[in-house]
Amino acid sequence: MKFTSPRPGQLPNNVHPPYKSTLARGPHQPRVEVLSRAAADQSLRLTRSIALRDADLTSQGQSAPLGQAITVSGRVVDEDGRPIRDSLIEVWQCNAAGRYAHVKDDHDAPLDADFPGFGKMLTDSDGRYHFKTIKPGAYPWGNHHNAWRPAHIHFSLFGNVYAQRLITQMYFPDDPLFPFDPIFNSIADKAARARLVSRFSLDETVSGVSLGYVFDIVLRGRSATPTGI
Ligand SMILES: [Fe+2]
């Protein structure tokens, strides 16, 4: 199978000096293509480890977490628009106050015992996924003076085999922190960056319950959603 390579600037710079930790941890050698048949044959069989509750991040505590309830939904497709079916998506995020339920997060913002901040789901036969959560807050980080991350949700996408695993981040429309965030701007191509931003949808909004956001993901090609961030 022949794949279309992304154009320069469509993927994040592995070493992006404004994003300081990439100087130490970014790869300095060219990437190595992994095309072994063995890797491609490791089909995922994870359906038994997924429960419906895993796609509702607001139902994993004793009561509803604090914050604005939202749903996120979309399709995962390949470069030709074909659905990626029965594929594992994992998501993780901070709480509404901008703090992760993680031992290494020392941001002075309140933890929410009702919000672990982790979910997982499978795409359906049309490549669609859907989960409920709360809108994450912005949080400060030590990259530079007054550095704050735009609100985001981390995504892990497996495609159909382990060797295809990709990581990306979903953002929210019109975030005022976009121009100042070196992670978001490590992707040089403006149109590619825009593909990381979800769109608000009144159709996906549940009356009286949650605001709806749509985030479609293209795994390869010239219209690919940037990954590796
Ligand atoms: Fe994050």
Image (cartoon, rainbow, N blue to C red):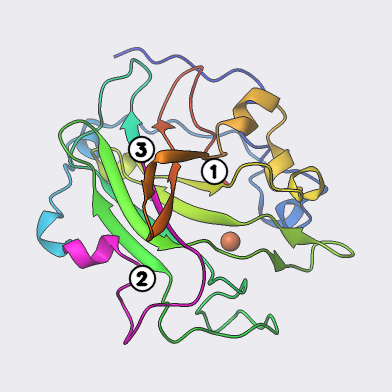
Mark closest to the chain's N terminus, 2 or 1 = 2
Q: Position of residue 39 (x, y in %)?
A: 25, 39
| Badge 1 amino acid | Gly
Note whether ligand 1 is within 8 Å of mark 2: no
Q: CA distance from mark 2 to mark 1?
A: 27 Å
| 109 within the magenta span | no
**Residue that label 3 marks:** 74
Residue ID for mark 1: 228
Badge 1: residue crowd in 10 Å (few <14, some 14–19, many ≥20): few
Element under label 1?
A: loop
What is the crowding at mark 3: few (fewer than 14 residues within 10 Å), some, or many (at least 20)? some
Pointer 1 or 3: first along the chain: 3
Residue 66 falls within the magenta-colored stretch: yes
Which residue: 64% across, 37% down? 12
Q: Which residue is mark 2?
A: 58
Q: Position of residue 151 (x, y in %)?
A: 62, 57
Q: Nearer the viewer, residue 113 or 49?
A: 113
- Most common secondary structure along the magenta stretch: loop
* Left or right: residue 52 compared with residue 153: left
Furthest toward the front, the residue is: 208
Q: Give above or below for 190 relative to 90.
A: above
The first of marks 2 and 3 along the sequence is 2
Give the total of numbered labels. 3
Q: Quadrant of residue 201?
A: top left
Q: Are marks 2 and 1 in contact (CB under 8 Å)?
A: no
Image point (12%, 54%), residue name: 47
